[in-house]
Image (cartoon, coloured by chain):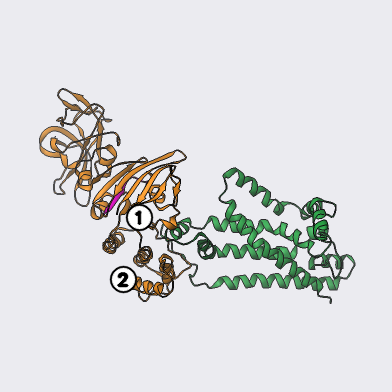
Chain colours: A green, B orange
Amino acid sequence: MDWYPLYNSLRIAAISTAVIFFLGIAAAYYIAKLPRLIKGILDVVLTLPLVLPPTVVGYLLLRVLGPKRIIGMWALETFGVKLVMTWWSAIFATMVVIFPLMYRTVRSAFESFDETLSYAGQTLGLSNTYIFWRIRMPCCRQGILAGTVLAFARALGEYGATSMIAGYTPGKTATISTTVYQLWRTGDDALAFRWVLVNVAISAVVLLAVNLLERKHPDGGKRRRRA
Amino acid sequence: MSLRVEIEKRLGNFALQAEFETREQTLALLGASGCGKSVTLKCIAGIMTPDKGRIELDGQVLFDAEKGINLPPQKRRVGYLFQQYALFPNMTVVQNICCGIRARGAERERLVREQMRRFQLEGLEKSYPAQLSSGQQQRVALARILAGEPKAILLDEPFSALDSYLKWSLEAELTQMLAAFSGPLVWVSHDLGECWRNCRTVCVLEQGRTGPVTDLETLVHRPATVEQARLAGCRNIYPVRLTPGGLRVPGWEASLPLPDSAEAGSMLGIPAEAVRVGCGGTPWTVCRAVRDLEWTEVLLQPEGATADAPVLCARLDLDQAVQVGETVTVSFDPARLLVLKERTGR
């Protein structure tokens, strides 16, 4: 069994989740402060990939990143880098698809954050950066962790947009999901089933890890609130 | 040291116009809920930015709209005690207190230990706020604020959500711990009793506008406006007409004695203590009697008056039995009648 698809899938999911972790948090933090109208518009635009079919996302990405399109041409001319049909092409696809998951879960976590904690920090002389990383983030860690895991799991399973923008080249752009489809299509049912088991195992481990991480934390999660 | 506030702030339909000054003493900012008390505090602390005006603390300008000065909350050195204390739930007691300390290194360690001892928090170093009692939470919050050596302290309805015993014990503790603080202190409250016990001067905020700073004695015994009279516990407030024979409350037949300061357009306040029941006067009918803990509260209407006539609320001693429907005599103590203005004038 050639393990390249596993390695490729993990690396794509890890890179895109790492990027989206910061992008999603930044978007959730700054968009919440915008005026209502702009917030509403950005919200729709940024959440759209969640409801669009992955093939539509793939098509739109090809329109932008293709070698004869604006960004694709620019990247090719400036850096000599092809943006489609390479292993890293899949990163663009997964990033677009998982961004809304991260953005929305983090946003709702931030919305339930008690702003008086941030005000208290400011009046005590704490910098806004300190308040963000040492108070807001730890208080919202459940939501942020949930968003990250959801994003990672979804990135690992991305198929539609990935297959359009990266295609299926064994040993080059093959991921677990494209491999499973390819093997099933060519009638290699046994091997396809093994890859399915691998995928199920990874997802289960990820979810289990989160549950264990969340189980015990010093402030106990029992946040006493007097009405 | 003094705190001078002169600000305007518009929030949707609500307009705040606050103006007061306080020195090394506790000023009560008293008002019904939604009158802009918290907004005023937030503007002083720098959490909110006023549209106009000026805030000055200890000779330093914290905010000046015209000169474009607006110090961030971090640089104002204004301590703010929030309603639920706003302790950071993810930090231990020591970490929470450290957040208030500006010094670094060994000095920081020393200050934390000092605060822990001063506020009787020893042994709770590694506890999280959720594991503390309300009293301990309040002490941590105060320790955290005072560790930063603030120049002024703002208290935002510190006991509004507590039951009466807890309120009583925390109030005593808070006053005791704040006794050592020498700067201006603004105590926001909607409870006159709380202000009476803890503050010397008071500024009433009604519908977003502050009145003059007065001492509490004056507010309680000689309120000047309808809102002040309500805050001072006066239940009987009526529009009145001036007639040659005295004051007429529409709906009541008899005239009332005329206080000197009465003028057209004023309102009449009759504190319960100004009403004498059963000592002669005109006949009134008891339409409701409620036994309270320390007195019986009766609602009266002049005998023969229509059902929609304004009612008069009076207090009787608990041993003075009255029946609903009974007729009693009522007279008024002219010296205690209040002539009130509709609202604060400037």
- Please, what is the three-letter code of the amino acid marked with disc 2? Arg
Give the residue drawn at x 61%, y 45%.
Answer: A38
Asked where in the image residue B241 lies, by quadrant, the reply is top left
* Disc 2 target residue: B118
B231 vs A81, left or right, is: left
Task: Confirm whether the magenta stretch covers residue B295.
Answer: no
**Which quadrant holds the N terminus of chain B?**
bottom left
Q: Position of residue A197 (x, y in %)?
A: 76, 72
Which residues fall within the magenta stretch? B25-33
- Please, what is the three-letter code of the amino acid marked with disc 1? Leu
Answer yes or no: is residue B330 visible.
no
* Disc marking residue B154: 1
Q: Earlier in the sequence, mark 1 or mark 2?
A: 2
Give the residue drawn at x 73%, y 70%.
Answer: A200
B337 vs B172, left or right, is: left
B264 vs B61, nearest the viewer:
B61
Instruction: Give the SS element for disc 1.
Output: strand
B54 vs A167, nearest the viewer:
B54
Q: Position of residue A143 (x, y in %)?
A: 58, 62
Q: Position of residue B24 (x, y in %)?
A: 27, 55
